[in-house]
Amino acid sequence: MKAVPDKNLKTFFVDAIRWNLKGSIPFQIFRVLLLIGMGIGIYAYSFQARHGLSVTGMTDIVSWGFYISNFTFLVGVAAAAVMLILPAYMFHDPDFHRVVLIGEGVAVGALVMCLSFIVVDMGGPLQAWHLIPGIGLFNFPSSILAWDVLVLNGYLLLNALVPAYILYSHYMGRKADERKYRPFVFLSIFWAFSIHMVTAFLYQGLPARPFWNNPLMGPRFLASAFAAGPALITLILAVIHSATSYKIDPKVFNKLRMIIVISAIINLLMLFSEIFKEFYFPTHHSISAIYLFFGIDGHNSLVPWIWTSVSVNLAATLVLAFNPGKNNPKVLLPACGFLFVAVWMEKGIGLIVPGLIPSPLGEIVDYLPTWVELGVTLGILSLGITVVTWLVRTALIIEQRYEE
Amino acid sequence: MSSQKKDEAKTIIEDVLEKPSSRRMFLKGASIAAAAGSAALAASYMSAADPASAGELKLRWQEYFKKNYRLMSQEEKDETVTRLERLAKFQDNMDVQIGTEPPTEKVLFGYAFNITRCEGFMECVTACVKENNLDRKTNTQYIRIFEMEPGQLDPSTGDGQYYHKVPVDDKFYMGVQCFHCENAPCIKACPTKATWKEPDGIVVVDYNWCIGCRYCQAACPYYGRRFNWGKGEVPKEEITTKQHYLGNRKRPMGKMEKCTFCIQRTRKGKLPACVEACPTGARVFGNLLDPDSEIRYVLKHKKVFRMKEEIGTQPKFWYFID
């Protein structure tokens, strides 16, 4: 395809918006549902803006809840894009090269959600400028939260700019210059690991919370992320494969399945190791784990939650490993879905809430999110999915035209 | 007003759900829903402001852009204090005096708690709530008193919710509050340097600089920090008007607060409210650098220990036994 002279950066954006406003009726309905979700989110947040975080289920004891849980999990989803980037750009795997832009789109969407969850969790979002180095006062390198702000925003930039450059080149009808973007790809690979390690260190670095103060936290974050993230990407690729004319090679699904299975098994091994440490010889540092898995004095709201998560996780991993349907997508895709949900349950609420229970003074309370938290979360999820669909749709149209 | 708005938004959403007649209608409905949501959000920020005079808005604008307290010159400190006092007049019709007394040289505050003497009356808690203008709505308390079984020395094994006549035979009592650690995990955690240790050893929070992320609260091994989940409420006639910028002044919603060793009192040479209120003399407060102080006497002559010593936080708060 020859470069058309009347194309420029402006038409690139105009076309991207134009393509996204068009689409089939079911696609438009999907878009409208997302808009409604965001509307509900804004409406729910308006209560929080007026009455503060008192409209959430959080208290001085359980001071982080549903928002930070989702944030923690979604950092993993964002980091998991590296499982496509690594083979695609480093090993020049042709199958992955065709889907890597989708993975990066998912990462950008996940990061937008992460940052949104942080903002809605803040008591003073209007003071967020205090975090900007220069005009604010940034407690770097002492505060791990300061590190997290840096690595998350850096990763967002890397994952937005590299694909944007490649897409723009393809849009203009020329090959993207690998020498230009390869250093940034290298950087983004290290960066992917760093966002999840730093997020783990956020919790791991707190001696006040024995449940989190655990050197396995970082590696386990990575393992669970590299299981849940590719599981989500598999589902998205399956949707793209069946709903659009952009066809995905079955080999991609096989390779993704291998990545998921290996990561999920490592994750389960580490989970087993943690459970062994907490329960073989329980100390007073094991109280949070006892609360999580068995409940204490009638406070057992998380017990069914965590057992559901662990059993679903185990079952889904077994199905993906042994592949009973002989690559039948009707077996593998639900397994991916279940694995994703199981990891979300465990690494979200199942990790954050028990870390704060009991309080450092031994008090046990239960935590339940309120409708405001659920509504705001729905809004943020809708926003994230919207971002992903916009990016992926633009990418696919450009790539398809470029391939022709 | 809010319920009316709620109904409006609901009916809009219902309309959208009930009339999926055409794509155009659909998109229109959705954008209306999103717009309604945004309007509700904007309105809520507005209503938080209430009808404010131009003078008040100007003050709030200037307050919004002020620096971290530690970076302010004395002049800037005086300016913000004047603004805050005028805002208190505007908003609550209150005459308050907000001080900026700096730390005194060669003073390092320390605290000791006599577990033999404390009988669990909680006079300290009441005095603290009153002195520090703590939120009455959510019953915020900086001090917790735990009723302990003999044979235990860790407050986390005690009962912090007791509600009966004290003292009970065969039980003893331990008070817990912010321990003003020399090596404080909360300070390390804060991403914006909104909390720090003053030269006289008091760990303080700049309520205006705090962004409300609550990482310090997760990092504190002693449950020493409290968050303003909603708008604090104190009956007007009970407000302590002698205040300090880093102490008992009005805290904004969504910010962290904590015990400041009653900075507004102790920097003027007075005792913290809890020490003054204690009917049994179980609480000792003083200058650790003064060899003749009572706190130094306790540290030298009594068997003392600190809570969770193994974490290495080095609290400036000791328990002792007569």
Image (tube, coloured by chain):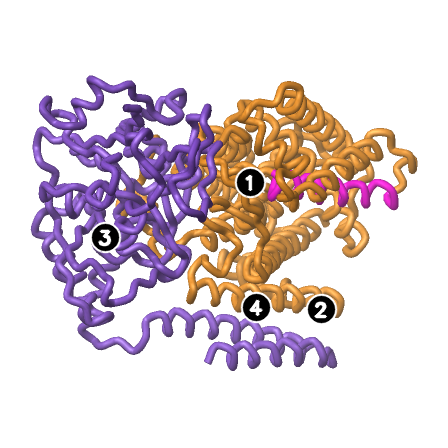
Chain colours: A orange, B purple
Q: Position of residue B113 (x, y in %)?
A: 28, 31
Cα gap from disc 2 to disc 4, whole angstroms: 15 Å
Mark 4 — residue? Answer: A39
Whether the residues at callouts 2 and 4 have beta carbons within 8 Å, the answer is no
Pointer 1: what residue?
Answer: A352
| Residue A209 visible | yes
Q: Amino acid at mark 2?
A: Ile
Crowd class of label 4 (few under 14; some 14 to 19; many from 20; radius 10 Å): many
- Asked if marks 3 and 2 fall on the same chain, the answer is no
Using the image, name the chain to which the residue with label 4 belongs.
Answer: A
Predominant secondary structure in magenta? helix
> Where does label 2 land, which residue?
A29
State how far apart marks 3 and 2 are (Cα).
58 Å
Looking at the image, the residue that sits furthest to the front is: B169
- Where are the magenta residues, as a range? A329-350
Q: Amino acid at mark 3?
A: Glu
> Residue B8 — which label?
none
> Mark 1 and mark 3: span between their CA atoms?
35 Å
The answer to whether mark 4 and mark 3 are in CB contact below 8 A is: no
* Residue under numbered circle 3: B131
Q: CA distance from mark 1 to mark 4?
A: 27 Å
Asked whether the residues under marks 2 and 4 belong to the same chain, the reply is yes
